[in-house]
Amino acid sequence: MESEYPSQLLDTAVQQMSSLPGIGKKTALRLVLHLLRQPSEDVERFASAMTRLKNEVHYCRCCHNISDQEVCSICSSHRRDKRTICVVENVQDVMAVENTGQYSGLYHVLGGVISPIDGVGPKDLQIESLVQRVQTEDVQEVILALPTTMEGDTTNFYIYRHLQPTGVKVSQIARGIAIGGEIEYADEITLGRSIQNRTEFRA
C-alpha cells in the first residue's frame, strides 16, 4: 500500500503516534514533525524516558498505584492515615484526589470497574487484594470513589458485599460528581467536597 506521506519512516512514526488515545492523524503528524525539528539529543531523551517508563516502572504491591519502588511513597509515608483506604478505578483518580488536598489516607487502585459488556469481571480487578488488606491491616473505613456510572455502581455493590463480613465501615463519596462522570475529570473543589461529605454506603 502506497504511503500518503513522502517518507515511509514518517508514515510509520505517524501511525505509531496516532495509536495513542485522543491523537488523530493530523495531530500525530504535527507532533512527529515537531520531534523531527528538535535536536537529536532531545528526541533521544524523549525516547529514553518512554522506554524507561515501560521497562522500569513498578506498581505498588500494596495499593497498585504507579511507583518507582516496590512500595509507593503514599503507602510508605508515616504522615498518611493508614486506617482509611480510598478505592479508585485507576492511577489518574489517585492524582485527582491528591490534588484536592482534602484526603490524607491510603488508596487502592482497582485497575478498572466491573463491565461484563467489555469482558471485565471481578477477577480482572484488584478486589481480592483489597479484601485481604482490610482483613490484615488496621483499616477502619473504606471509601468508594468510583465513577457514578452503572459499571461503577455495580463495582461498589460487589465490593460492599465482599467487605460486609469484615465489619469495616464502607462509605462512598457524595454525589457532587455528575451522574455518569469520571473522577479524574471532576474539578478539585467538587471532588474535594465529595470526599469530605462522603456518606455511608447503602446497598
Image: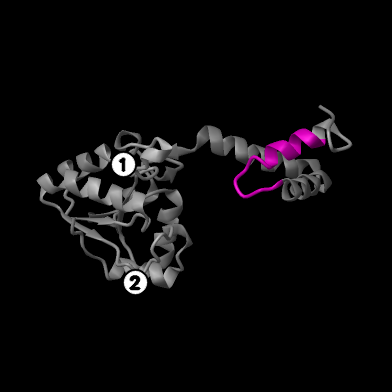
Instruction: Identify the element where label 2 is drawn.
Output: helix
Q: Is residue 128 left or right of residue 3?
A: left
Specify whether residue 152 is in view.
yes
Q: Which of marks 1 and 2 is nearer the N terminus?
A: 1
Q: Do the residues labelled 1 and 2 touch (CB within 8 Å)?
A: no
Residue 24 position in % (x across, y down): 69, 48
Q: Give the range drawn in magenta.
A: 10-24
What residue is pinned by disc 2? Answer: 193
Residue in view at x 41 percent, y 72 percent: 189
Q: Viewer-proximal residue, 175 or 190?
A: 175
Q: Which of marks 1 and 2 is in front?
A: 2
Q: Is residue 68 magenta?
A: no
Q: What amino acid type should be assigned to the residue bearing mark 1?
A: Cys
Above or below, 73 against 61 in this view is below
Q: Viewer-proximal residue, 89 or 39?
A: 89
Residue at the far top: name it: 1
Residue in view at x 21 percent, y 42 percent: 131
Q: Is residue 146 left or right of residue 45?
A: left
Determine the CA span between mark 1 and mark 2. 27 Å
Q: What amino acid type should be assigned to the residue bearing mark 2?
A: Arg
Instruction: Identify the element where label 1 is drawn.
Output: loop
The answer to which quarter of the image holds residue 125 is top left
Residue 115 position in % (x across, y down): 37, 42
Q: Viewer-proximal residue, 86 or 147?
A: 147
What residue is pinned by disc 1? Answer: 62
Above or below, 153 against 12 in this view is below
